[in-house]
Amino acid sequence: MGSNSFGHTFQISTFGESHGGGVGVIVDGCPPRLPITSEEIQADLDRRKPGQSSLTTPRQEDDQVEILSGLFEGYSLGSPISLIVRNKDARPSAYENMKSVYRPSHADYTTDAKYGIRNWQGGGRSSARATIAHVASGAIARKLLALAAGIEVVAWVSEVHGIGSTVDMDRVTTADVYNNDVRCPDASAATAMEAAIHNARKNQDSVGGIVTCVARGVPPGLGMPIFDKLEADLAKAMLSLPATKGFEIGSGFGGTLLTGSEHNDAFIPGEGDQKIATASNRSGGVQGGMSNGQPIFFRTAFKPTATISQTQNTVDQAGNATTLEAKGRHDPCVLPRAVPIIEAMTCLVLADHWLRQRSVDVLPPLG
């Protein structure tokens, strides 16, 4: 099974299954002498772990990170950093009745079609539990970005099942986001979202929505002009996550309704170190595949959780029609726990491109 690594210069390789021994990641390319502690990594993992509220899966996991290599006396060594979180509350027996039956909208059938074998205990490698590795490594990337470049990344739930919110992306903070269980800084919208999620759980159903993310303090020039465009790598990062179905940056699809004169971001004199700015930011902070110094913001769409308790029509491995009543512990809405995962993937992409830019800046500018 390939495609378990992500990144170019700041690279991660992940491993583990939902109900196996644990989930882990190897981070390669982190510069030496970066101060990082297990507590800092744990803080992000705690925001992702299950059992946080009545809106999430009741699975009880502490998700305690173990650092196996790459750090010494609180600093990175420049060698690979190995992290692991061991599964403590796995219940593979809950999936016994689904051993030979394909769950609708899951990766069961497609995994069998590709590999001819699959771990039927939960989602296996395709489970959202694998995102522990994303968040753990993303915490290291976050520390690098903050310390070396002053970059800040904040994500929040901006929509659930058609219930939208109003959030000032220039001012929103992590504390604002975590002021409620939905992870939406708009209090009135959060109340309505919470009701919708509880209603879905009551009806043995699920709902989806949108997570919005902003990266502030990103310097101009990160990214590449052709295949490794910054927005392309961000899109790949977000759409690699379980349950994601859409990505748009800046004006996104709404921008198609404007004319060029309406959509263009006029350049204006900047302030301080940022000598050039834009009067608007419909580009979402990226132009020509590279950051322009303005805040980068984008939205990621998540489908309703595929596992629901209602009886559903499906087929078994032999193609015979049957029905399925899924068991196990699942989120009626993945969005509240997706927030730190979106932030982590954003940090991984930006850290990778920030390090890649360092190779371009070896020589002084011409003139």
Image (spheres, rainbow, N blue to C red):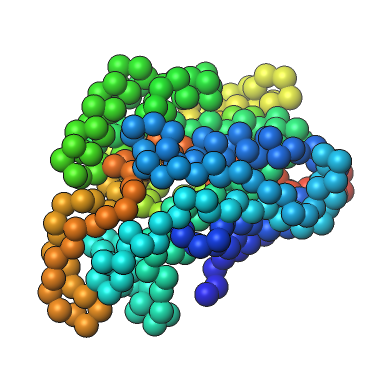
**Residue at 50% in and 40% down:** 48
Find residue 251 and report its image quarter. top left
Identify the image quadrant of the C terminus.
top right
The foreground one among 96 and 185 is 96
Residue 357's spot in the image, x, y percent?
A: 73, 48
The foreground one among 265 and 247 is 247
Query: With 363 as the anchor, is 356 left or right in this view?
Result: left
Above or below, 99 relative to 200: below
Residue 117's spot in the image, x, y percent?
A: 41, 79
**Residue at 15% in and 59% down:** 312
**Residue 28, can we see it?**
yes
Find residue 186 and report its image quarter. top left
Query: With 142 as the anchor, is 355 left or right in this view?
Result: right
Above or below, 223 relative to 127: above
Query: With 320 as the anchor, is 277 left or right in this view?
Result: right
Above or below, 334 relative to 266: below
**Residue at 23% in and 62% down:** 104
Residue 129's spot in the image, x, y percent?
A: 47, 52
Above or below, 329 relative to 201: below
Residue 18's spot in the image, x, y percent?
A: 46, 58
**Residue at 32% in and 62% down:** 95
**Residue 123, can we see it?**
no
* Number of numbered discs visible in the structure rendering: 0
Find residue 45 and report its image quarter. top right
